[in-house]
Image: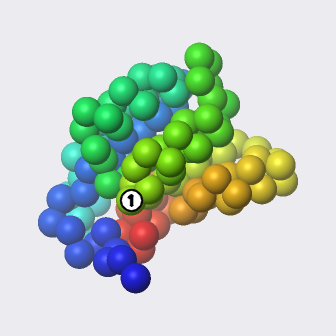
Amino acid sequence: MRETLASQRVIRVLIVDDEPLFRLGLAAALAEDERLEFIVSEAGDGEAGLARIASEEPAVVLLDLNMPRLDGHAVLRQVKQRWPEIRIIVLTGSDSVDDRWRGERAGVDAFVEKRHAHAQLSVLIASL
């Protein structure tokens, strides 16, 4: 069994979402957390996200499913094949059973509804 991320002093997080204001809000929420220190980077689509993952090796990727160029399902599959140690939290705005099934099949670590993400993410990240 692997250690939870709460045992790390600093946690590298990559936010991959095509909504700039949403990314900014998540980064601000993580920066305000007093229990853990996060180093946050961002990407606006799946292709840019994969490039940043390769260069930065984050501990956690916060991943939107519906993005241009390369969608979150494709990113999730590639990350879990190439970097299985990276934890993936899918940020979803829908209650799609198909999205959850596909994500679970690909190895997602957790799902968070976008409307609750700001309040839940730091605790969820620490628990992974």
State the image coordinates of residue 108 (x, y, percent, origin top left): 58, 57
State the image coordinates of residue 125 (x, y, percent, origin top left): 40, 63
State the image coordinates of residue 16 (x, y, percent, origin top left): 47, 34
Q: Hey, which residue is sitting farthest right in the picture?
A: 97
Q: Is residue 12 left or right of residue 23?
A: left
Q: Disc 1 on helix, strand or loop?
A: loop
Q: Is residue 15 left or right of residue 72?
A: left
Nearest the eye: 119 or 45: 45
State the image coordinates of residue 85 (x, y, percent, origin top left): 39, 59
Task: Tell me the quarter of the image containing the C terminus.
Answer: bottom left
Residue appearing at x 42%, y 31% in the figure: 50
- For the residue carrying disc 1, how many other residues have a C-alpha within 10 Å: few (<14), some (14-19), or many (20+)? some
Q: Is residue 28 left or right of residue 113?
A: left
Residue appearing at x 32%, y 35% in the figure: 54
Check disc 1 and report the residue beneath it: 85
Evaluate whether residue 64 shows in this view.
Answer: no
The total of numbered circles placed on residues is: 1
Q: Hey, which residue is sitting farthest bottom in the picture?
A: 1
Residue appearing at x 44%, y 56% in the figure: 84
Residue appearing at x 52%, y 27% in the figure: 46
